[in-house]
Protein backbone atom coordinates (compact mmCIF):
# COMPACT_ATOMS: atom_id res chain seq x y z
CA UNK A 1 0.00 0.00 0.00
CA UNK A 2 1.51 3.31 -1.07
CA UNK A 3 1.42 6.13 1.45
CA UNK A 4 0.41 9.35 -0.30
CA UNK A 5 1.85 12.68 0.72
CA UNK A 6 -0.09 15.68 -0.61
CA UNK A 7 0.44 19.42 -0.31
CA UNK A 8 -2.79 20.94 -1.57
CA UNK A 9 -3.03 24.15 -3.57
CA UNK A 10 -6.08 25.64 -5.30
CA UNK A 11 -6.61 25.43 -9.02
CA UNK A 12 -5.07 28.64 -10.28
CA UNK A 13 -6.86 29.25 -13.55
CA UNK A 14 -9.20 27.67 -16.08
CA UNK A 15 -8.27 27.85 -18.87
CA UNK A 16 -4.45 9.74 -40.64
CA UNK A 17 -5.01 7.45 -42.34
CA UNK A 18 -2.70 4.56 -41.40
CA UNK A 19 -0.15 3.16 -43.76
CA UNK A 20 -1.00 -0.27 -42.36
CA UNK A 21 -4.73 0.34 -42.38
CA UNK A 22 -7.02 -2.64 -41.91
CA UNK A 23 -10.25 -0.93 -40.85
CA UNK A 24 -12.05 2.28 -41.68
CA UNK A 25 -11.84 4.25 -38.47
CA UNK A 26 -8.71 6.40 -38.71
CA UNK A 27 -8.95 9.84 -40.30
CA UNK A 28 -6.76 12.18 -42.31
CA UNK A 29 -5.08 14.85 -40.19
CA UNK A 30 -3.29 18.09 -40.95
CA UNK A 31 -0.20 17.73 -38.73
CA UNK A 32 0.54 14.02 -38.35
CA UNK A 33 0.63 11.64 -41.32
CA UNK A 34 1.51 7.93 -40.82
CA UNK A 35 4.60 7.08 -42.84
CA UNK A 36 5.32 3.49 -41.85
CA UNK A 37 4.56 0.81 -39.29
CA UNK A 38 6.40 -2.21 -37.93
CA UNK A 39 5.64 -4.85 -35.31
CA UNK A 40 8.25 -5.43 -32.61
CA UNK A 41 8.93 -7.89 -29.81
CA UNK A 42 9.93 -5.01 -27.54
CA UNK A 43 7.66 -2.08 -28.29
CA UNK A 44 7.45 0.18 -25.24
CA UNK A 45 10.36 2.64 -25.20
CA UNK A 46 12.75 3.62 -28.00
CA UNK A 47 15.82 5.81 -28.39
CA UNK A 48 17.27 7.09 -31.66
CA UNK A 49 20.90 7.26 -32.82
CA UNK A 50 20.80 9.86 -35.63
CA UNK A 51 24.32 9.44 -36.99
CA UNK A 52 23.60 5.78 -37.79
CA UNK A 53 19.83 6.06 -38.34
CA UNK A 54 19.22 3.30 -35.83
CA UNK A 55 16.40 2.94 -33.33
CA UNK A 56 16.87 0.91 -30.15
CA UNK A 57 13.64 -0.38 -28.58
CA UNK A 58 12.92 -2.21 -25.30
CA UNK A 59 9.95 -3.34 -23.24
CA UNK A 60 8.91 -6.10 -20.81
CA UNK A 61 11.73 -8.48 -21.68
CA UNK A 62 15.50 -8.81 -21.59
CA UNK A 63 15.70 -8.10 -25.32
CA UNK A 64 16.55 -4.97 -27.26
CA UNK A 65 15.40 -4.60 -30.86
CA UNK A 66 17.59 -2.62 -33.25
CA UNK A 67 15.55 -1.05 -36.05
CA UNK A 68 17.22 0.26 -39.20
CA UNK A 69 15.68 3.56 -40.34
CA UNK A 70 17.95 4.09 -43.35
CA UNK A 71 14.70 4.02 -45.31
CA UNK A 72 12.08 5.28 -42.82
CA UNK A 73 9.28 4.29 -45.18
CA UNK A 74 10.38 0.68 -44.67
CA UNK A 75 11.83 0.22 -41.17
CA UNK A 76 13.55 -3.12 -40.66
CA UNK A 77 14.48 -4.98 -37.47
CA UNK A 78 18.19 -5.37 -37.96
CA UNK A 79 18.94 -7.52 -34.92
CA UNK A 80 17.64 -8.41 -31.50
CA UNK A 81 20.09 -8.94 -28.66
CA UNK A 82 19.89 -9.86 -24.99
CA UNK A 83 20.43 -7.60 -21.99
CA UNK A 84 21.40 -8.53 -18.43
CA UNK A 85 17.82 -8.18 -17.13
CA UNK A 86 14.28 -7.08 -17.95
CA UNK A 87 14.55 -3.68 -19.61
CA UNK A 88 12.23 -0.81 -18.68
CA UNK A 89 13.75 2.11 -20.58
CA UNK A 90 16.54 3.12 -22.95
CA UNK A 91 18.42 6.34 -23.72
CA UNK A 92 21.17 7.34 -26.17
CA UNK A 93 23.86 10.00 -26.26
CA UNK A 94 26.35 9.96 -29.12
CA UNK A 95 27.33 6.31 -29.54
CA UNK A 96 26.50 5.38 -25.93
CA UNK A 97 23.39 3.34 -25.14
CA UNK A 98 22.00 2.96 -21.62
CA UNK A 99 19.14 0.77 -20.47
CA UNK A 100 17.51 0.48 -17.04
CA UNK A 101 17.02 -3.10 -15.86
CA UNK A 102 14.86 -4.65 -13.16
CA UNK A 103 16.33 -6.96 -10.55
CA UNK A 104 14.74 -10.32 -9.74
CA UNK A 105 12.68 -9.88 -7.61
CA UNK A 106 11.75 -6.48 -9.05
CA UNK A 107 11.59 -4.67 -5.69
CA UNK A 108 15.33 -5.12 -5.12
CA UNK A 109 17.87 -2.60 -6.42
CA UNK A 110 17.96 -2.66 -10.20
CA UNK A 111 20.72 -1.84 -12.66
CA UNK A 112 21.87 0.33 -15.53
CA UNK A 113 23.51 -1.46 -18.44
CA UNK A 114 25.83 0.82 -20.40
CA UNK A 115 26.86 -0.06 -23.95
CA UNK A 116 28.70 1.49 -26.88
CA UNK A 117 27.79 1.23 -30.54
CA UNK A 118 30.98 0.37 -32.41
CA UNK A 119 29.69 -0.07 -35.96
CA UNK A 120 29.16 -3.10 -38.13
CA UNK A 121 31.20 -6.16 -37.14
CA UNK A 122 32.16 -9.40 -38.92
CA UNK A 123 29.83 -12.36 -38.39
CA UNK A 124 32.42 -14.18 -36.23
CA UNK A 125 32.94 -11.16 -33.96
CA UNK A 126 32.11 -11.43 -30.23
CA UNK A 127 30.47 -8.01 -30.45
CA UNK A 128 26.70 -8.33 -30.92
CA UNK A 129 25.02 -6.06 -33.50
CA UNK A 130 27.98 -3.70 -33.33
CA UNK A 131 27.17 -3.04 -29.65
CA UNK A 132 29.85 -3.57 -27.03
CA UNK A 133 28.98 -3.79 -23.35
CA UNK A 134 30.78 -1.34 -21.07
CA UNK A 135 29.32 -2.46 -17.75
CA UNK A 136 26.31 -3.01 -15.52
CA UNK A 137 25.88 -0.81 -12.45
CA UNK A 138 23.54 -1.12 -9.46
CA UNK A 139 21.26 1.87 -8.85
CA UNK A 140 18.03 1.80 -6.80
CA UNK A 141 14.78 -0.15 -6.47
CA UNK A 142 12.66 -0.76 -9.58
CA UNK A 143 14.34 1.61 -12.10
CA UNK A 144 11.55 2.58 -14.49
CA UNK A 145 12.93 5.40 -16.65
CA UNK A 146 16.40 6.47 -17.74
CA UNK A 147 17.74 9.50 -19.59
CA UNK A 148 21.08 11.05 -20.44
CA UNK A 149 21.57 14.69 -19.59
CA UNK A 150 21.89 16.77 -22.79
CA UNK A 151 25.65 17.20 -22.20
CA UNK A 152 26.09 13.44 -21.81
CA UNK A 153 27.93 13.76 -18.50
CA UNK A 154 25.33 11.92 -16.44
CA UNK A 155 22.52 9.40 -16.55
CA UNK A 156 19.42 10.02 -14.46
CA UNK A 157 17.29 7.08 -13.37
CA UNK A 158 13.80 7.23 -11.85
CA UNK A 159 13.44 4.38 -9.37
CA UNK A 160 9.83 3.71 -8.38
CA UNK A 161 10.60 1.56 -5.36
CA UNK A 162 7.41 -0.45 -5.87
CA UNK A 163 6.48 -2.80 -3.01
CA UNK A 164 6.62 -6.58 -3.23
CA UNK A 165 3.51 -8.42 -4.42
CA UNK A 166 2.49 -9.34 -0.87
CA UNK A 167 3.05 -5.76 0.29
CA UNK A 168 5.42 -6.81 3.07
CA UNK A 169 8.42 -5.06 1.54
CA UNK A 170 8.17 -1.44 0.41
CA UNK A 171 11.62 -0.18 -0.65
CA UNK A 172 12.29 3.55 -0.95
CA UNK A 173 11.95 5.25 -4.31
CA UNK A 174 14.63 7.62 -5.49
CA UNK A 175 16.54 9.19 -8.35
CA UNK A 176 19.97 7.81 -9.22
CA UNK A 177 22.58 10.05 -10.83
CA UNK A 178 25.24 8.08 -12.69
CA UNK A 179 28.25 10.30 -13.42
CA UNK A 180 29.82 9.60 -16.83
CA UNK A 181 32.54 12.21 -17.21
CA UNK A 182 34.91 9.57 -18.60
CA UNK A 183 32.31 7.59 -20.53
CA UNK A 184 34.31 7.54 -23.75
CA UNK A 185 36.69 5.03 -22.19
CA UNK A 186 35.83 1.36 -21.99
CA UNK A 187 37.25 0.87 -18.47
CA UNK A 188 35.19 3.57 -16.76
CA UNK A 189 33.80 3.18 -13.26
CA UNK A 190 30.79 5.51 -13.02
CA UNK A 191 29.95 7.08 -9.68
CA UNK A 192 26.34 6.34 -8.68
CA UNK A 193 24.58 8.76 -6.31
CA UNK A 194 21.01 8.15 -5.14
CA UNK A 195 19.25 11.42 -4.31
CA UNK A 196 17.46 11.01 -0.94
CA UNK A 197 13.86 12.13 -0.39
CA UNK A 198 14.13 12.49 3.41
CA UNK A 199 12.09 9.39 4.29
CA UNK A 200 9.03 10.54 2.29
CA UNK A 201 7.34 7.62 0.51
CA UNK A 202 7.70 8.53 -3.18
CA UNK A 203 7.63 6.57 -6.43
CA UNK A 204 9.50 8.59 -9.09
CA UNK A 205 7.98 7.93 -12.50
CA UNK A 206 9.51 10.11 -15.22
CA UNK A 207 12.34 12.62 -15.67
CA UNK A 208 12.87 15.66 -17.88
CA UNK A 209 16.12 17.67 -17.94
CA UNK A 210 16.92 21.31 -18.71
CA UNK A 211 18.95 22.11 -21.84
CA UNK A 212 21.94 23.19 -19.75
CA UNK A 213 21.88 19.84 -17.88
CA UNK A 214 21.76 21.60 -14.49
CA UNK A 215 18.17 20.83 -13.48
CA UNK A 216 15.86 17.85 -13.66
CA UNK A 217 12.16 17.52 -12.90
CA UNK A 218 10.75 14.22 -11.71
CA UNK A 219 7.08 13.23 -11.69
CA UNK A 220 5.96 11.70 -8.39
CA UNK A 221 2.74 10.25 -9.71
CA UNK A 222 1.26 8.69 -6.59
CA UNK A 223 2.10 11.83 -4.59
CA UNK A 224 0.57 14.21 -7.16
CA UNK A 225 3.78 16.24 -7.17
CA UNK A 226 6.94 17.11 -9.09
CA UNK A 227 10.41 17.11 -7.57
CA UNK A 228 13.17 19.39 -8.85
CA UNK A 229 16.70 17.98 -8.73
CA UNK A 230 19.95 19.95 -8.66
CA UNK A 231 21.91 17.71 -11.02
CA UNK A 232 25.30 19.32 -10.38
CA UNK A 233 24.81 19.31 -6.60
CA UNK A 234 23.19 15.86 -6.75
CA UNK A 235 20.46 16.86 -4.33
CA UNK A 236 16.74 17.51 -4.04
CA UNK A 237 16.07 21.21 -4.61
CA UNK A 238 12.32 21.31 -4.04
CA UNK A 239 8.93 19.65 -4.47
CA UNK A 240 5.74 21.30 -5.69
CA UNK A 241 2.22 19.96 -5.51
CA UNK A 242 0.17 19.71 -8.71
CA UNK A 243 -3.23 20.39 -7.20
CA UNK A 244 -6.46 19.18 -8.72
CA UNK A 245 -8.88 19.97 -11.52
CA UNK A 246 -12.31 21.08 -10.33
CA UNK A 247 -14.69 19.40 -12.76
CA UNK A 248 -17.57 21.58 -11.56
CA UNK A 249 -16.02 24.60 -13.30
CA UNK A 250 -16.82 25.70 -16.84
CA UNK A 251 -14.41 24.20 -19.38
CA UNK A 252 -13.49 21.32 -17.05
CA UNK A 253 -16.37 18.90 -17.55
CA UNK A 254 -16.03 15.14 -17.98
CA UNK A 255 -18.03 12.03 -18.70
CA UNK A 256 -17.88 10.18 -15.38
CA UNK A 257 -20.73 7.74 -16.04
CA UNK A 258 -20.37 4.38 -17.80
CA UNK A 259 -23.73 4.11 -19.55
CA UNK A 260 -22.84 3.74 -23.22
CA UNK A 261 -23.57 7.40 -23.89
CA UNK A 262 -21.44 10.53 -24.29
CA UNK A 263 -22.22 12.86 -21.40
CA UNK A 264 -19.54 15.52 -20.95
CA UNK A 265 -20.83 17.69 -18.14
CA UNK A 266 -19.78 19.46 -14.98
CA UNK A 267 -19.79 17.38 -11.81
CA UNK A 268 -18.78 17.84 -8.20
CA UNK A 269 -15.58 15.86 -8.81
CA UNK A 270 -11.97 16.82 -8.19
CA UNK A 271 -9.39 15.14 -10.37
CA UNK A 272 -5.86 14.75 -9.05
CA UNK A 273 -3.48 15.27 -11.96
CA UNK A 274 -0.92 12.59 -11.00
CA UNK A 275 1.10 12.73 -14.25
CA UNK A 276 3.14 9.96 -15.78
CA UNK A 277 5.23 11.53 -18.56
CA UNK A 278 6.45 15.11 -18.26
CA UNK A 279 8.51 17.36 -20.54
CA UNK A 280 10.25 20.68 -19.97
CA UNK A 281 10.85 23.52 -22.42
CA UNK A 282 12.38 26.96 -22.14
CA UNK A 283 11.56 30.46 -23.31
CA UNK A 284 13.83 33.49 -23.05
CA UNK A 285 12.93 34.08 -19.42
CA UNK A 286 11.28 30.94 -18.04
CA UNK A 287 11.32 27.17 -17.87
CA UNK A 288 8.03 25.29 -18.05
CA UNK A 289 7.09 21.69 -17.33
CA UNK A 290 4.22 20.07 -19.22
CA UNK A 291 2.46 17.15 -17.57
CA UNK A 292 0.44 14.26 -19.04
CA UNK A 293 -2.15 13.77 -16.31
CA UNK A 294 -2.74 10.02 -16.41
CA UNK A 295 -3.71 9.32 -12.78
CA UNK A 296 -2.29 6.71 -10.42
CA UNK A 297 -3.63 3.31 -9.42
CA UNK A 298 -4.53 4.01 -5.80
CA UNK A 299 -6.86 2.06 -3.52
CA UNK A 300 -8.51 2.96 -0.21
CA UNK A 301 -7.91 6.67 -0.63
CA UNK A 302 -9.36 9.03 1.99
CA UNK A 303 -11.37 11.56 -0.04
CA UNK A 304 -11.56 13.95 2.92
CA UNK A 305 -7.94 14.88 2.21
CA UNK A 306 -9.19 16.67 -0.90
CA UNK A 307 -12.88 17.29 -0.23
CA UNK A 308 -12.83 18.14 3.46
CA UNK A 309 -16.39 18.01 4.83
CA UNK A 310 -18.10 18.54 1.46
CA UNK A 311 -20.43 15.53 1.33
CA UNK A 312 -21.17 15.62 -2.41
CA UNK A 313 -17.51 15.88 -3.43
CA UNK A 314 -15.80 12.93 -5.11
CA UNK A 315 -12.16 12.38 -6.07
CA UNK A 316 -10.86 10.79 -9.27
CA UNK A 317 -7.29 9.95 -10.18
CA UNK A 318 -6.11 11.69 -13.33
CA UNK A 319 -7.63 14.83 -14.83
CA UNK A 320 -7.91 13.70 -18.49
CA UNK A 321 -5.87 16.74 -19.47
CA UNK A 322 -2.39 18.15 -19.85
CA UNK A 323 -1.08 21.02 -17.73
CA UNK A 324 1.74 23.54 -17.92
CA UNK A 325 3.61 24.60 -14.77
CA UNK A 326 6.41 27.05 -14.10
CA UNK A 327 9.40 24.80 -13.45
CA UNK A 328 10.76 26.86 -10.57
CA UNK A 329 7.80 28.49 -8.84
CA UNK A 330 5.48 25.53 -9.39
CA UNK A 331 2.70 27.91 -10.48
CA UNK A 332 0.01 26.45 -12.71
CA UNK A 333 0.07 28.30 -16.03
CA UNK A 334 -2.57 26.45 -18.04
CA UNK A 335 -4.68 23.29 -18.15
CA UNK A 336 -6.40 21.84 -21.22
CA UNK A 337 -9.59 21.09 -19.28
CA UNK A 338 -12.15 19.01 -21.18
CA UNK A 339 -10.70 19.76 -24.64
CA UNK A 340 -9.54 16.18 -25.16
CA UNK A 341 -12.84 14.51 -24.28
CA UNK A 342 -14.77 16.93 -26.47
CA UNK A 343 -12.46 16.18 -29.39
CA UNK A 344 -12.91 12.43 -28.90
CA UNK A 345 -16.68 12.90 -28.95
CA UNK A 346 -16.50 15.00 -32.11
CA UNK A 347 -14.06 12.93 -34.11
CA UNK A 348 -14.29 9.34 -32.86
CA UNK A 349 -17.66 8.93 -31.11
CA UNK A 350 -17.70 5.16 -31.71
CA UNK A 351 -14.46 4.89 -29.70
CA UNK A 352 -15.22 7.54 -27.09
CA UNK A 353 -13.41 6.55 -23.85
CA UNK A 354 -12.99 2.96 -25.04
CA UNK A 355 -10.44 0.63 -23.45
CA UNK A 356 -7.79 0.10 -26.12
CA UNK A 357 -5.93 -2.36 -23.89
CA UNK A 358 -8.63 -4.95 -24.53
CA UNK A 359 -8.81 -4.07 -28.22
CA UNK A 360 -12.59 -4.36 -28.35
CA UNK A 361 -14.61 -1.37 -29.49
CA UNK A 362 -16.88 -0.55 -26.57
CA UNK A 363 -17.55 3.16 -26.25
CA UNK A 364 -17.74 4.73 -22.79
CA UNK A 365 -15.96 1.76 -21.15
CA UNK A 366 -13.48 3.98 -19.27
CA UNK A 367 -15.68 6.97 -18.44
CA UNK A 368 -16.26 5.86 -14.85
CA UNK A 369 -12.53 5.24 -14.34
CA UNK A 370 -9.63 7.41 -15.58
CA UNK A 371 -10.92 8.09 -19.07
CA UNK A 372 -8.32 8.51 -21.82
CA UNK A 373 -5.25 8.42 -19.51
CA UNK A 374 -2.73 10.87 -21.03
CA UNK A 375 0.45 8.79 -20.77
CA UNK A 376 3.40 10.62 -22.25
CA UNK A 377 4.39 13.86 -23.92
CA UNK A 378 7.14 15.13 -26.20
CA UNK A 379 7.70 18.65 -27.49
CA UNK A 380 9.23 19.92 -30.70
CA UNK A 381 9.38 23.04 -32.84
CA UNK A 382 7.95 22.74 -36.35
CA UNK A 383 7.81 25.72 -38.72
CA UNK A 384 8.15 28.13 -35.81
CA UNK A 385 5.41 26.48 -33.74
CA UNK A 386 6.09 24.76 -30.41
CA UNK A 387 4.01 21.59 -30.57
CA UNK A 388 3.28 19.10 -27.80
CA UNK A 389 2.48 15.54 -28.85
CA UNK A 390 0.49 13.63 -26.23
CA UNK A 391 0.03 9.86 -26.21
CA UNK A 392 -3.26 8.66 -24.71
CA UNK A 393 -2.88 5.19 -23.24
CA UNK A 394 -6.48 3.94 -22.95
CA UNK A 395 -8.17 6.04 -25.63
CA UNK A 396 -5.03 5.48 -27.72
CA UNK A 397 -3.78 7.78 -30.47
CA UNK A 398 -1.92 11.08 -30.31
CA UNK A 399 -3.18 14.59 -29.57
CA UNK A 400 -1.29 17.67 -30.79
CA UNK A 401 -1.31 20.93 -28.83
CA UNK A 402 0.17 24.25 -29.95
CA UNK A 403 2.05 25.71 -26.96
CA UNK A 404 3.71 28.56 -28.86
CA UNK A 405 1.79 31.15 -26.86
CA UNK A 406 2.96 29.97 -23.44
CA UNK A 407 4.56 32.95 -21.76
CA UNK A 408 2.40 35.37 -23.75
CA UNK A 409 -0.33 37.06 -21.73
CA UNK A 410 -3.98 36.59 -22.70
CA UNK A 411 -3.22 34.00 -25.40
CA UNK A 412 -4.13 30.40 -24.53
CA UNK A 413 -2.60 27.26 -26.05
CA UNK A 414 -4.90 25.20 -28.21
CA UNK A 415 -5.63 21.64 -29.24
CA UNK A 416 -4.67 21.39 -32.91
CA UNK A 417 -5.76 17.84 -33.67
CA UNK A 418 -6.20 14.30 -32.44
CA UNK A 419 -5.59 11.19 -34.52
CA UNK A 420 -6.14 7.52 -33.72
CA UNK A 421 -6.04 4.19 -35.54
CA UNK A 422 -7.56 1.29 -33.53
CA UNK A 423 -4.95 -1.05 -34.99
CA UNK A 424 -2.26 0.75 -32.97
CA UNK A 425 -3.13 0.66 -29.29
CA UNK A 426 -1.61 1.97 -26.07
CA UNK A 427 1.03 4.62 -26.89
CA UNK A 428 3.89 4.45 -24.40
CA UNK A 429 7.25 5.74 -25.64
CA UNK A 430 7.37 8.76 -27.96
CA UNK A 431 10.22 10.45 -29.82
CA UNK A 432 10.25 13.78 -31.64
CA UNK A 433 13.07 13.97 -34.19
CA UNK A 434 13.68 17.35 -35.79
CA UNK A 435 14.38 17.90 -39.48
CA UNK A 436 18.16 18.10 -38.91
CA UNK A 437 18.38 14.64 -37.32
CA UNK A 438 15.49 12.99 -39.12
CA UNK A 439 16.15 9.90 -41.26
CA UNK A 440 13.69 11.48 -43.69
CA UNK A 441 15.88 14.37 -44.79
CA UNK A 442 14.37 17.78 -44.08
CA UNK A 443 11.18 16.41 -42.50
CA UNK A 444 10.55 16.19 -38.75
CA UNK A 445 9.02 12.92 -37.58
CA UNK A 446 7.27 11.48 -34.54
CA UNK A 447 7.96 7.89 -33.50
CA UNK A 448 5.43 6.21 -31.23
CA UNK A 449 5.76 2.85 -29.48
CA UNK A 450 2.34 1.25 -29.00
CA UNK A 451 2.58 -1.08 -26.01
CA UNK A 452 -0.68 -3.02 -26.37
CA UNK A 453 -0.47 -3.74 -30.11
CA UNK A 454 3.33 -4.21 -30.05
CA UNK A 455 3.67 -1.85 -32.99
CA UNK A 456 5.87 1.11 -33.79
CA UNK A 457 4.55 3.87 -36.03
CA UNK A 458 6.51 6.65 -37.72
CA UNK A 459 4.59 9.84 -38.51
CA UNK A 460 5.69 12.80 -40.59
CA UNK A 461 4.91 16.22 -39.10
CA UNK A 462 3.68 19.26 -41.03
Image (cartoon, grey):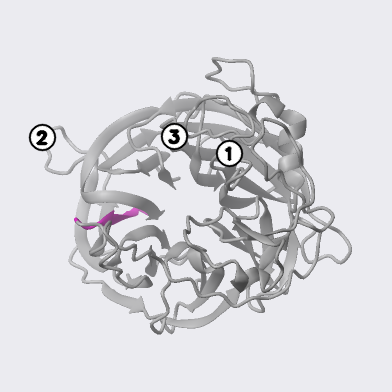
How many other residues sit within 10 Å of disc 3, few (<14), some (14-19) or many (≥20)?
many
Mark 1 closeness class: few <14, some 14–19, many ≥20 residues within 10 Å = many
**Residue 452 — which label?**
3
Marked residue nearer the N-terminal end (1 or 2): 2
Evaluate if marks 3 and 2 touch, with contact meaning CB atoms under 8 Å apart.
Answer: no
- Mark 1 = which residue? 445
Residue 436 higher or lower than 208, as above or below: above
Cα distance between the residues tagged 1 and 2: 36 Å
389 vs 242, nearest the viewer: 242
Nearest the eye: 337 or 30: 337
Which span is picked out in magenta?
94-104
Q: Residue placed at 71% from the left, 28% from the top? A: 349
Percent of width and height locating residue 462:
70, 36
Q: Quadrant of residue 366?
A: top right
- Whether residue 95 is in magenta: the answer is yes
* Residue pointed to by mark 2: 124
Q: Nearer the viewer, mark 1 or mark 3?
A: 3
x%, y% of residue 362? 59, 27
Q: Nearer the viewer, residue 413 or 198?
A: 198
Q: Could you say whether the residue bearing mark 3 is in a helix, strand or loop?
A: loop
Q: Residue 175: name its quadrant.
A: bottom left
Amino acid sequence: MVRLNFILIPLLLAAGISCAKKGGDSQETSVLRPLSRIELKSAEISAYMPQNRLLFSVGDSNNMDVVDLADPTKPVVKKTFSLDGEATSVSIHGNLIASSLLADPAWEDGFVELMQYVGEQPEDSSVVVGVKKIGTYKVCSHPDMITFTPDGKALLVACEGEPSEDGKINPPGGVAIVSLDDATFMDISPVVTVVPFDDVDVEPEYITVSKDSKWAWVSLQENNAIARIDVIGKKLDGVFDLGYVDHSKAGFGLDAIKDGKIRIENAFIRGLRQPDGIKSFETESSTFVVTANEGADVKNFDESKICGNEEMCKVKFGSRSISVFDGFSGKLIWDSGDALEREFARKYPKYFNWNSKKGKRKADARSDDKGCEPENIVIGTVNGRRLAFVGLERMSGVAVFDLTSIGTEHVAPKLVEYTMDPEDRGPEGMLFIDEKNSPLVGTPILIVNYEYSKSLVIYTIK
